Image: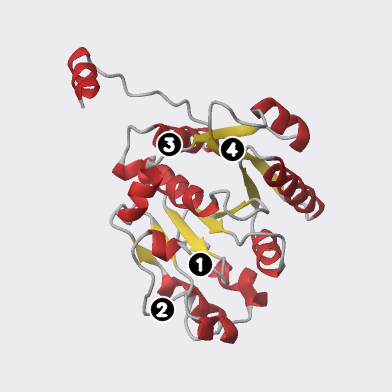
């Protein structure tokens, strides 16, 4: 049965799109058929991140009733599938998002997991995406405003009867202002993934690919791979480096 997971957090800029793309790619590497849908209609970024900012058929067309959503599915070279939204203001004005739930149901049976990359805030687009999801993955970073917005998102999701999978802490550093323990206390949910701040994410963006594929041994990639294993109930085992590979890495 196809599962719909909304990647959401309330505050903008916490890394929802980066998490959606890399979690999707990491799950795909583990043998799951994953489709990432850009339900951030106002400021869509999935297509931009993966080098497909303009496509012939997109989510807006499906929402406008012009095409079935299956016609808007594109396969990235990595194997993960995406449904981009249009970056055109004209398309946005023509699009009524109210039938998002019904349109997304067209993906049932076509893929194992649908990851919904949600809009920032808790406005209409985010609420419709939450309503269309089975489970919520809360993304925040170690700053009090972001954690506060994440708490609002969690409470709203719980009031809608949605299961909270856990919290993903992005852009983490050694001197985080809010610790993992404090975040778990405030949100009353476990932090199931810690994603370090890493410039490799920007390098992957420049390459129009997921960082788990462009820089598979980076700290940020390890973070997303661990998260994918956790969501599937699998134990993550880091790849062991040999003596010579360690020497060569030091010299680079």
Mark 4 vs 3, N-terminal side: 4
Element type at mark 3 = helix
The residue tagged 1 is: 44
What's the residue at 46%, 34% (across, down)?
A: 223
Marks 4 and 3 in Cβ contact (< 8 Å): no
- Circle nearer the viewer, 2 or 3: 3
What's the residue at 50%, 74% (across, down)?
A: 59
Number of numbered discs: 4
Mark 2 vs 3, N-terminal side: 2
Measured Cα–Cα span from mark 1 to mark 3: 23 Å
Measured Cα–Cα span from mark 2 to mark 1: 15 Å
Mark 1 vs 3, N-terminal side: 1
The residue tagged 4 is: 169
- Residue 212: image location, x then y, percent: 36, 42
Name which quarter of the figure residue 143 lies in.
top right
Measured Cα–Cα span from mark 4 to mark 3: 12 Å
The residue tagged 2 is: 57
The residue tagged 3 is: 220
Name which quarter of the figure residue 243 lies in.
top left
**Is residue 203 something that shows in the picture?**
yes
């Amino acid at each position: 049965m196809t599962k719909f997971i909304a990647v959401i957090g309330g505050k903008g800029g916490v890394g929802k799109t980066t998490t959606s793309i890399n979690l999707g790619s990491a799950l795909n590497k583990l043998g799951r058929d994953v489709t990432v849908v850009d339900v951030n209609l106002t400021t869509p970024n999935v297509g931009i991140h993966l080098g497909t900012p303009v496509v012939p058929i997109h989510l807006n067309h499906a929402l406008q009733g012009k095409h079935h959503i299956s016609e808007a599915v594109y396969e990235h070279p990595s194997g993960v599938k995406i449904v981009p939204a249009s970056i055109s203001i004209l398309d946005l004005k023509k699009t009524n998002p109210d039938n998002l739930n019904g349109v997304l149901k067209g993906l049932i049976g076509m893929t194992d997991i649908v990851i919904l990359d949600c809009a920032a805030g808790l406005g209409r687009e985010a609420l419709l995406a939450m309503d269309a999801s089975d489970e919520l993955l809360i993304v925040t970073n170690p700053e009090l405003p972001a954690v506060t917005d994440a708490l609002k998102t969690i409470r709203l999701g719980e009031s809608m009867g949605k299961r909270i999978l856990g919290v993903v802490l992005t852009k983490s550093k050694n001197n985080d202002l809010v610790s993992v323990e404090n975040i778990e206390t405030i949100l009353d949910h476990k932090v199931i993934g810690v994603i370090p701040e890493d410039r490799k994410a920007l390098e992957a963006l420049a390459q129009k690919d997921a960082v788990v594929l462009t820089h598979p041994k980076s700290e940020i990639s390890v973070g997303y791979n661990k998260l994918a294993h956790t969501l599937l109930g699998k134990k993550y085992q880091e790849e062991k480096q040999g003596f010579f590979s360690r020497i060569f890495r030091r010299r680079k």
